[in-house]
Amino acid sequence: MRKWVFIFLILSILTTPVFAQKKEKLMVYTSMKETLIGDLKKGFEKKYPNVSLDYYSAGAGKIMAKIAAERQSGKLAVDVIWTSEVPDFYSMKKEGILQRYESPEAKNVVSPLFDPDYEFTPARLGTLGITYNTNKIKTPPKEWTDLLTPEYKNGFGIANPALSGTAMVSVAMLVDTFGWDFIQKLRANGAKMGEGSGQVVDDTAAGDLVACIGVDYITIDKIKLGAPLGFAYPKQMLVIPSPVAIFKGTPNLSAAQKFVDFLLSKDGQAIIASNCTLPIRRDVPIAEGVGLVSPEEAVKRSIKIDYIKLIDEKQAIIDKFISIMQSK
């Protein structure tokens, strides 16, 4: 009898939820849109039910300011950072605050950017093209120089690079490729400086602008809602990877590594692709019928830029661009 009681007790112990592992926690700071990070949270927690993922979603500038304040206080709340502000990752790497992690999924990454030390890894390809109002522009632009024609006079917009990291990198890429003379010619044709990346797309949809440099998913989201917009990539593409990195010293290293693995996995990248932006894997289908190109095509056509050099030149680029755009 005692033997059977003992066996029953052992079986009860082995099957009781009390013996479930303590739930891991993870905090991610990201500049990705709420719908994307929300979808990723659902997918991640479904795959890893023993990890509770929380996130803070804001612009990259606010995120870096928050991290700086936390570091000054001596208590860093974030485990993983994922934004599109590539220069920030080089700066953090230089400071020595990022954890090296070569995910087994990293071998599948297609990107114009690569960190050989694996302190950060591209997890999304953000692209910008020419967003245009289809009521005003009948022939989709094919070259950046098309923006200098009378069709775009007094109607082309670019977000303020002081307010938008993607706009700043876009301006730097265009200047590296075509020189400041191109920016001056845009201004001579009446180009305007808007505020954020979302606002210039809104102004184009409203007809206040005929076209703008537009972020892929922002434009496509508007098109899906019925906005009279088109989206075109010139031959030389603006491709800005969104790296992900783990902070050195995180007490939640295992959970952080699981998140990076999931983000780079086929399942994670499928969620990214479903949000109308480019995945970093060849084996994940892109959203169709919205003007996107494959990751391989985007990387092949991408304008290359030295992000380390850009760290030092960033403010000078912003200042000169604003000066040109405010000139009469």
Image (spheres, grey):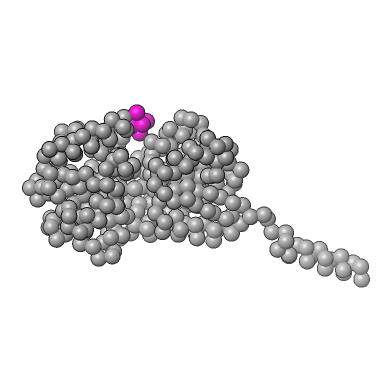
Residue 22 appears anywhere in the view = yes
- In this rendering, is residue 277 above or below 183? below
Residue that lies at the very extreme toward the right in this rendered image? 1
Q: Position of residue 116 (x, y in %)?
A: 45, 34
Toward which corner of the image does residue 22 lie, by quadrant?
bottom right
- Residue, x 17% and y 48% (percent of image)? 156
Quarter of the rendering occupied by the N terminus: bottom right
Relative depth, front residue between 295 and 189:
189
Q: Position of residue 117 (x, y in %)?
A: 48, 34
Stretch in magenta: 307-312
Main structural element of the magenta stretch: helix, strand or loop?
Answer: helix
Residue 235 appears anywhere in the view = no
Q: Position of residue 279 (x, y in %)?
A: 38, 51
Residue that lies at the very extreme toward the bottom in this rendered image? 1
- In this rendering, is residue 113 above or below 255? above
Quarter of the rendering occupied by the C terminus: top left
- Residue, x 26% and y 33% (percent of image)? 319
**160 sits to left or right of 112:** left
Relative depth, front residue between 54 and 147:
54
- Residue, x 20% and y 47% (percent of image)? 157
**261 sits to left or right of 20:** left
Q: Does 3 appear in magenta?
A: no
Toward which corner of the image does residue 325 lie, by quadrant?
top left
- Residue, x 21% and y 49% (percent of image)? 212
Q: Position of residue 127 (x, y in %)?
A: 30, 48
Residue that lies at the very extreme toward the left in this rendered image? 150
Toward which corner of the image does residue 165 lie, by quadrant?
top left
**284 sits to left or right of 313:** right
